[in-house]
Image: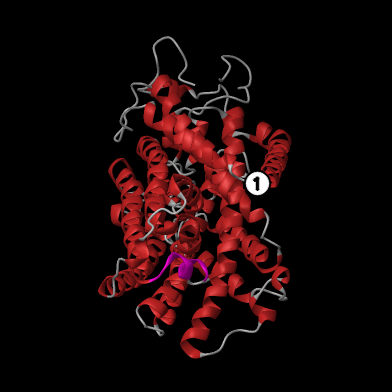
Amino acid sequence: MATTSGRPGIFAVRDVRSLITETAEEGHGLKKAVGATQLTAMGVGAIIGTGIFVVIGEGAGIAGPAVILSFVLAAVACTFSALSYAELASSIPVSGSAYTYTYATMGELVAWIIGWDLILEYGVSVAAIAVGWGGNLNAFLDAAFGFALPDAIAKSPEDGGIFNLPAVFVVLAITFLLVRGVSESARVNFVMVVIKLAVLLFFIVVAFANFGTGNFQPFAPEGTDGVTAAAAVIFFAYIGFDAVSTGSEEARKPERDLPLAIIGSLIICTIFYVATTVGAIGIASPEQLESSDAPLAAALDQGAGISWAAAILALGAVVAITSVVLVIMYGQTRIFFAMCRDGLLPQRLAKVNQRYGTPARLTIILGVLISILAALVPLSEIVKLVNIGTLFAFILVNIGVIVLRRTRPEMPRPYRVPWSPVLPLIGIAFAIYLMTDLPWDTWVRFVVWLAIGVLIYWLYGYKNSRLRREQPSTPNWARENDPHKPEGGDPS
């Protein structure tokens, strides 16, 4: 906690009122330009990517037809953390997501650690997804027009190419769009979400028109172990709803729109995932789905006799991945922006462009760095850090709800997690369970990355922190006007 005299300690907590007040500062305030529909589309845009187009085959190979239950179980596992994100996003409508929530509950050092974790998680995720975008673009060009880009310019050196041009193109294009404005980005994302949902709806309609029950026996050949094992794989097809919370500061009515968007996007994606899975099993066996790199296209080809559907599904995958790149990269820029505004990273990068209402300089720098990463750097191993980083953030957000309920019981909460702390504790348990299944080398890389982050914090973040430069630890105006201040003490 902050000290009453001298410099605040490494576990000093940011006052919620001051965090919210800073969003209106000249040069550091983001434009409030998105509503519930656009935020929900952002959630759907971040969640539905290559996961449903690919992971359904892997899950069916593990659980058989019971993979349907695996999708439901994975959704339930995510729901507990989604509820906690909804409470904190509506109560603390400030950019930064888990980083900001942790700063307001567990202190600066823990906030820095999760922020540093999210920088890697989002950056590597965008680079890896951009590489996948290039591969799916080639698959679409081959299926629709019978040609593909040469490997030399379509693959990174890790995969036998020289320079991954499609990955660079999509990252720089998204960077340009994000610089132009959040409302423009949200509109483009909305169009892409409509397209990819239409592609999935096309699959569902065709599948149910040719539906049979023969592939559902035996339903669970591996029993409950198979269902839970497949759920651990499928869980990562749901990751992305947390990116909605990074748009807290730009929401017109965050207290209403953010809970609707976070929970709504998860519900929409679950419905589409389950319907798609039921339809796929209805026209193709689990073995057929598992043996294909494009299981949905294989299901339509072998089960419904529609060979030309591969082009439609390849197009859906390209659009789906594009929207994921957009939303995840948007989330990273807002987390980085919040850390810069707090002084833990160079504060000049938090300057908002007055014409576009976005952190343009910061967005361009990140876009260039991510494009280089996607074009040249081997990602096959470090991409595993995305999983552990996401689960770590889930744990801290659930803890944040519990802590803030005790330290700020009187704080306005437009949305409240029901049955707290039971549901947040269940969310923590699910995240820990899934983290225990991750490989040992992933844990080692994760610890090394965090150790590097702690070193940077001691060398730069600690002495440049806004909390530490603006003494006393909580400004007079915040102490005098904070409606959440407990009697007889500093709210920090």
Q: Tell me if residue 56 is in the magenta stretch.
A: no
| Residue at the disc numbered 1 | 439
- Secondary structure of the magenta portion, mostly? helix
User: Which range of residues does the magenta coloring cover?
Assistant: 284-291
For the point 70% across and 46% down, which residue is it?
441
- On the image, which quarter does residue 150 sit in? bottom right
For this orientation, the residue located farthest to the bottom is 146
For the point 33% across and 46% down, which residue is it?
263
The answer to whether residue 362 shows anywhere in this view is yes
Percent position (x, y) of residue 145?
49, 90
- Amino acid found under the numbered disc labelled 1: Pro
Percent position (x, y) of residue 88?
40, 36
Say if 443 sits above or below 217 in the image: above
Left or right of 424 in this view: 209: left
Left or right of 320 in this view: 116: right
Q: How is the image coloured?
A: secondary structure
- On the image, which quarter does residue 488 sit in? top left
Say if 442 sits above or below 175 in the image: above
Q: How many marks?
A: 1
The answer to whether residue 193 shows anywhere in this view is no
For this orientation, the residue located farthest to the top is 488
Image quadrant occupied by the N terminus: top right
Q: What secondary structure is found at the residue carrying circle 1? A: loop
Of 306 and 78, which appears nearest the observer? 306
Q: Tell me if residue 285 is in the magenta stretch.
A: yes
